[in-house]
Amino acid sequence: MRLFTMEFANSSSDQFVCSLTYLLIVQVRELETELEAEQHRHVDSQKSVRKQDRRLQELILQLDEAQKSHDRLKDMIDKLQAKNKQYKRQVEEAVR
């Protein structure tokens, strides 16, 4: 009877180990699947960041160009206002 009990215990132990091994393999596969999905999301995120960075650089260049254009126009306005004042003075002097 003792031999039978030991064989049963060994058999149960082997089944338990096999069950644990199977569960661990399943968990590892699930984790690998999650890792792969996360890696894909990471790659997509990196692509998105690069795309947004390029867009940001484009907007910065557009802003710089707009600022330069604004400065040139402001300069022209200042010069025209100065000429306008000069012409007004000349007209006033000519009228006197």
Image: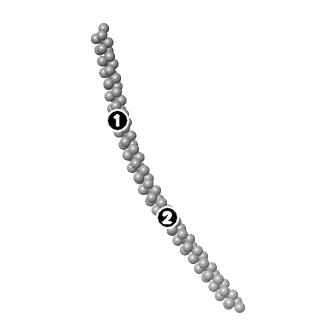
Residue at horizontal 62 percent and vertical 79 percent from the top: 16
Instruction: Decide: few, some or many residues near mark 1? Use Cα within 10 Å; few <14, some 14-19, many ≥20.
Output: few
Q: Are marks 1 and 2 in contact (CB under 8 Å)?
A: no
The residue furthest front is 95
- Amino acid at pointer 2: Ala
Q: CA distance from mark 1 to mark 2?
A: 48 Å
- Specify how the rendered protein is coloured: one colour
- Amino acid at pointer 1: Ser
**Residue 31 at x, y = what percent?**
53, 68
**Residue 62 at x, y = what percent?**
37, 42
Front-most of residues 92 and 11:
92
Instruction: Decide: few, some or many residues near mark 2? Use Cα within 10 Å; few <14, some 14-19, many ≥20.
Output: few
Give me the disc on residue 26: none
**Residue 40 at x, y = what percent?**
46, 62
| Residue 52 vertical placement versus 76 (above, below) | below
Q: Quadrant of residue 76?
A: top left
Front-most of residues 95 and 4:
95
Give me the disc on residue 37: 2
Quickly name the residue at label 1: 69
Q: Secondary structure at mark 2?
A: helix
Q: Nearer the viewer, mark 1 or mark 2?
A: 1
| Residue 93 vertical placement versus 43 (above, below) | above
- For the C terminus, which image quadrant? top left
| Residue 20 vertical placement versus 78 (above, below) | below
Front-most of residues 31 and 71:
71
